[in-house]
C-alpha cells in the first residue's frame, strides 16, 4: 500500500504585514474622503440645474479647490480635462442626471 503524505498546512496572515494600515488611519482617510465628496457635491448641486436640460447624461468633473468644473460626453475625457489644467489635483466625476450617479449596480 502506498504511503500518503500529509497535506501541508496553509499559512495564515498578510502577505505584506508592514503595509497594514491602522483602524485610526482608515477612519481618518474615510472622513477626509467624505469631506472632499461633500465639497464636490455642493458645487454639483449648484450647477446641475444649469446643464441638466442641455447636457443630460453627460459627465461633469469637479475640482473643488478652484470651484472649476469640466463637462464632456465621456467620463474619462471629463476627468482628463481636469488633469490637463490641474495635474496634481484630486477631482470627482458626477453624471448630469437627477442623482449624479455614474454607473449601475
Image (cartoon, grey):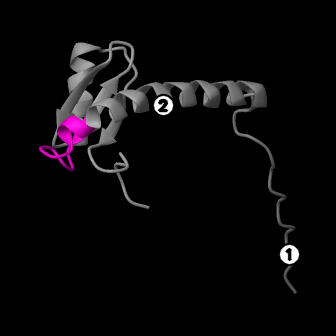
Q: Position of residue 45 (x, y in %)?
A: 36, 35
User: Which contiguous range is marked in magenta?
Assistant: 49-60
How many numbered circles are shown? 2
Q: CA distance from mark 2 to mark 1?
A: 58 Å
Mark 2 = which residue?
37
Instruction: Nearest to the eye among marks 2 and 1: give it.
Output: 2
Q: Quadrant of residue 47?
A: top left
Residue 67 on the magenta segment: no
Q: Which is more toward the observer, 88 or 33?
A: 33
Q: Residues within 10 Å of mark 2 (few under 14, many from 20)?
A: some
Instruction: Name the residue located 40 percent from the left edge and 21 percent from the top edge.
Output: 90
- The kind of secondary structure element at disc 2 is helix
Instruction: Name the residue located 12 percent from the left edge and 44 percent from the top edge.
Output: 54
Q: Position of residue 40 (x, y in %)?
A: 41, 28
Give the left or right position of residue 39, taking residue 30 as reference. Answer: left
Q: Earlier in the sequence, mark 2 or mark 1?
A: 1
Please state, as top left, top right, bottom left or bottom right, where the C terminus lies in the image: bottom left
Outermost bottom residue: 1
Q: Position of residue 101 (x, y in %)?
A: 37, 49
Q: Which is more toward the observer, 83 or 6?
A: 83
Q: Position of residue 92 (x, y in %)?
A: 38, 31
Mark 1 = which residue?
4
Amino acid at each position: 500500500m502506498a504511503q500518503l503524505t500529509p497535506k501541508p498546512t496553509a499559512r495564515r496572515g498578510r502577505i505584506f504585514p508592514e503595509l497594514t494600515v491602522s483602524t485610526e488611519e482608515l477612519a481618518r482617510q474615510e472622513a477626509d474622503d467624505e469631506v472632499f465628496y461633500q465639497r464636490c457635491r455642493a458645487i454639483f448641486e449648484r450647477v446641475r440645474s444649469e446643464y441638466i436640460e442641455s447636457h443630460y447624461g453627460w459627465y461633469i468633473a469637479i475640482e473643488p479647490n478652484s470651484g472649476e468644473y469640466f463637462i464632456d460626453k465621456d467620463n474619462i475625457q471629463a476627468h482628463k480635462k481636469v488633469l490637463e489644467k490641474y495635474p496634481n489635483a484630486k477631482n470627482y466625476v458626477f453624471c448630469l442626471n437627477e442623482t449624479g450617479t455614474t454607473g449601475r449596480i
